[in-house]
Image (cartoon, rainbow, N blue to C red):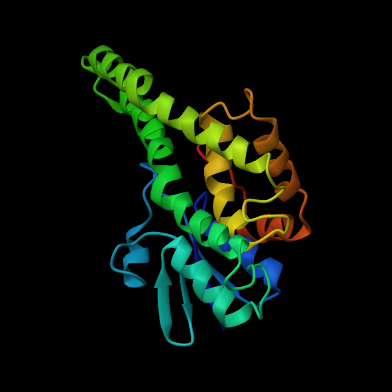
Amino acid sequence: MLTVHHLNNSRSQRVLWLLEELGVPYEIVRYQRQPDMRAPKELRAIHPLGKSPVITDNGNTIAESGAIIEYLIATYGNGRLIPPANTPERLRYTYWLHYAEGSAMQPLLLKLLFTLMPKRAPALLRPLVRKVCNQALTALVNPQIKQHMDYWEGELAKSEWFAGSEFTAADIQMSFPLEAAQARGGLEQGHPKAMAFLERIHARPAYNRALEKGGPYQVGR
């Protein structure tokens, strides 16, 4: 049976959601983050990088969210959650599937790191670390995040979903950046289309079934 190696509060929640949307049977092997928020070393026994998400299926071990989604759609989708080939919607689908991790998550990850660093610095160095991190956030990170959020807002003004008028796996992939932006990027300020997107996905039965199976999920908190 297909196995999801599921790390709590991680991108692997998207994999559970996709499997619920497709109605594919699966089992979950659970891993808990360490106090420093890193994945436990046991995940390295599944994949050398020891990161999540990762799945095993029919002798295959597949890591990386985009690669997992492509595999699941190709293997179990039967044409579902992906636009027809050689259409503008298919091109948009492919773009958003790769953009989510290739571009959108980078500044959001930097935001998390620069926010956490002062809290974890030695007490004597904390004021200096906080000053440097705040400067990086103000000059570099926050403007990039705003640029991405404004971009999403503009695209979602054109269509209800990222690839067009139909919900696709690209929306599942894009859920994580938008949820992270809501948690720590100020998405709720001036981005009603993006916030409405989150409301739509959070209302989907498959999304909620995945939450029930995956456990508590609080991106960026």
Quadrant of the snapshot with the N terminus:
bottom right
Q: Quadrant of residue 48?
A: bottom left
Q: Nearer the viewer, residue 83 or 70?
A: 83
> Residue at (62%, 23%) from the top-left corner?
189
> Residue at (21%, 14%) from the top-left corner?
124
Residue 63 lies, in percent from the top left, at 40, 67
Q: Quadrant of residue 98?
A: bottom left
Q: Residue furthest bottom?
A: 58
* Image vertical order of residue 18 relative to residue 110, above or below: below
* Image vertical order of residue 107 relative to residue 68, above or below: above
Q: Nearer the viewer, residue 170 or 110?
A: 170
Residue 143 lies, in percent from the top left, at 42, 25
Residue 144 lies, in percent from the top left, at 41, 30
Report how many numbered discs are placed on residues in the image: 0
Confirm whether residue 221 shows in the render. Answer: no
Confirm whether residue 77 shows in the render. Answer: yes
Q: Quadrant of residue 15?
A: bottom right
> Residue at (46%, 31%) from the top-left corner?
145
Q: Nearer the viewer, residue 58 or 72?
A: 72
> Residue at (70%, 47%) from the top-left corner?
159
Residue 214 falls left or right of residue 45:
right
* Image vertical order of residue 134 relative to residue 79, above or below: above
Residue 220 falls left or right of residue 144:
right
